[in-house]
Amino acid sequence: MGLPSPGLWLKRLWVLFQVALHVAIGKVLLTLFPRRVKQNILAMGEKTGMTRNPHFSHENWIPTFFSTQYFWFILKVRWQRLEDMTEQGGLAPNCPVVRLSGERCSIWDFMQDGWAFKNNVDIKNHRNLQDRLRAAHLLLDRSPPCPVVVDTMTNQSSSCYAALPERLYVLQEGRVLYKGKPGPWNYHPEEVRAVLENLHS
């Protein structure tokens, strides 16, 4: 991949400033007005459907907002979005991935059916490919109706598709037919369903 260009470093520096300011202001507001901030966060969660999942209680995620871990995660996500290589209607990056058998292949090798995630799975950060494969087996235990592959440890697919923390795509014949907005706040599974239904009609 090489070193990022000077322009990318300037963009990263600007994003660092924005995220640091966001977290600092959020922390101050959460300290001074905890009830109001929680109400706003819950309203946003309700709007996006996050509060409808009984396995995703707001008591587990609101206290994590504006923490050090939150800062580093948001920074990582925003930096990754600077390297987004996908455009709707454009060529889909053919990144390397790993099947659960350990066989290396590319993302295009399994682009036959659409994705259909139905629930959240709590998975820790992976330190090696074996951790990542074990986590994928947790997903397999839920019998997803789609192929399951994992990104390599270089996270090339995640970077090319700006997929952190989550993003929905519809790919067909090497093209990006649908590129959703980043989740969990801004993605819309109903749009994916509409695209898939149009493909099969």
Image (spheres, rainbow, N blue to C red):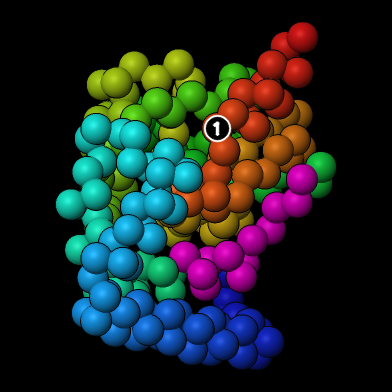
Does 31 sit above or below residue 121? below
* Quadrant in which residue 117 is drawn: top left
Viewer-proximal residue, 88 or 50?
A: 50
Q: Is residue 185 left or right of residue 38?
A: right
Residue under label 1, please give it. Answer: 189
Viewer-proximal residue, 192 or 155?
A: 192
Label 1 CA crowd tier, 10 Å (few <14, some 14–19, many 20+): some
Does 119 sit above or below residue 76? above
Magenta stretch bounds: 77-88
Asked whether 182 falls inside the magenta stretch, the response is no
Viewer-proximal residue, 159 or 11?
A: 11
Query: On the rendered image, what quadrant is the N terminus found in?
Result: bottom right
* Quadrant in which residue 187 is drawn: top right
Q: In this view, does 188 lie to the left or right of 145?
A: right
Residue that extends furthest to the right in the rendered view of this protein: 89
Write the residue at 43% across / 39% down: 49
Residue 18 % position (x, y): 50, 83
Residue 7 % position (x, y): 68, 87
Write the residue at 33% across / 41% down: 51
* Quadrant in which residue 135 is drawn: top left
Write the residue at 29% across / 84% down: 28
Task: Check disc 1 and give the amino acid type.
Answer: Pro
Write the residue at 54% across / 50% down: 186
Query: On the rendered image, what quadrant is the C terminus found in?
Result: top right
Residue 199 % position (x, y): 75, 18
Asked whether 81 falls inside the magenta stretch, the response is yes
Residue 78 % position (x, y): 51, 69
